[in-house]
Amino acid sequence: MKILIVNTFYYPNMVGGTENSVKILSENLVKEGNKVAVYTLDATEQFVKETINGVQIYRGKNKIIQNNRLLKKFFDINNILIKKQIRKVIEDFKPDLIHTNNLYGISNIIWKIAKKEYNIPIIHTLRDYWMLYPIVSKEKISKLVFQPFMRKRTKYVDIVTAPSNYTLNKFIEAGYFSESKKQCIYNAININIKETKEIIQKRNIDNKEKIKFMYVGMLIENKGIRNLLEAFSKIKNENISLHIYGKGELENIVKQRVKENHKVKYYGQLSTDKLKNEWLKNDVLIVPSIWEEPFGRVVIEANQYGLPVIGANRAGILETITNIQTGLLYQYDNIEELVKAIQYFENRDNIKKYYKAIEDNIEKYSIENQIKEFMKLYKNMVNITLKNKK
């Protein structure tokens, strides 16, 4: 099968979790024997065509003047300037189907072109809430002006998926994708089940008194880092420490707290390889997000290294922790509840209670399961299109 995957950025331009998800999906679809191409708008030159790990990549360049904010926002939503580029990619690769993801910059004009001009089946995966609120700070304008336009364009999408039921339902309630088939397909990671079980085996015989909590992610307001720091300042146990990994606009606040509290350590943002060693050194992950995370990949990443999770009861975080049953949830804006959750895990025996659930349930989020689910949808889409052509 020839699959064209579309996302604003692609490896090595890793902006966030979406790029990681798209890379994992693309490379594993290739391993399954499919021909996969990715179209992005992250080129520094005019147009670049290359191959990485078996994935053919078309890197287009966004022609929008970046310093004109209003103009950029308009073309994010309806980029009429890249029509020729989209046609060029489609005609060169000749995909059986198109799977779109984050589309800011590219815009959903690709749906219209692919469906009306080439009759190519389209699947779209909701990775964030951008299509609901393209102008984040202007929610009323988004609802009055942009949502009706975005909603109308969703008629070109055959199937819409999301990594959590919460995210999918948010769009359904807003009237999006009314004519599309809908399905929740969890995000995935490359899980080595055997390795996870070996890690848990070692953790089960660990009786050290000192417990290490960790935070991994952006140091920004909506990730709840201020609440985490405040909660940890209330912990009196000297055997407890907090280890923070990431970067962002609140980095100075974190550094200041490190000076004030010897139990808080900061490491900056680490590469995937270096971070693996840190997962193995720590005991519990804390995800204090105050915004509605569409999924919460970091929960699964922690689980694969045997860490239970304390998570805010918001959207995808709540759903993922509940599905695997590997952690505690607390009211996202209640610092006292977060303190109690941390205190519960001061006892290593309580940490060990979650190991079996990790072993039993983490496979739900394996890339093998995700590929199986997407391949079923892909085949159905192509078969229906072929029947319609006849």
Image: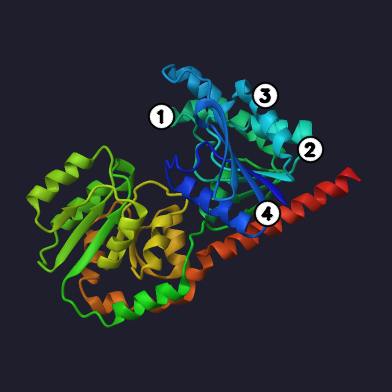
- Nearer to us: label 2 or label 1: 2
Q: Which of marks 3 and 4 is nearer the N terminus?
A: 4
Residue 299 in the image: x percent, y percent?
39, 60
Q: What is the spatial separation of the Cα atoms under label 3 and label 4, in whole angstroms?
A: 26 Å
Amino acid residing under circle 2: Asn
Q: Which of marks 2 and 1 is nearer the N terminus?
A: 2
Residue 84's tag is: 3
Amino acid residing under circle 1: Ser
Q: What is the spatial separation of the Cα atoms under label 2 and label 1, in whole angstroms?
A: 36 Å
Q: Image height check: is 281 above or below 88?
A: below
Residue plotted at (62% across, 33% down): 108
Amino acid residing under circle 4: Asn
Q: SS of the residue at dot 3?
A: helix
- The residue labelled by disc 2 is 119
Residue 137's tag is: 1
- The residue labelled by disc 4 is 34
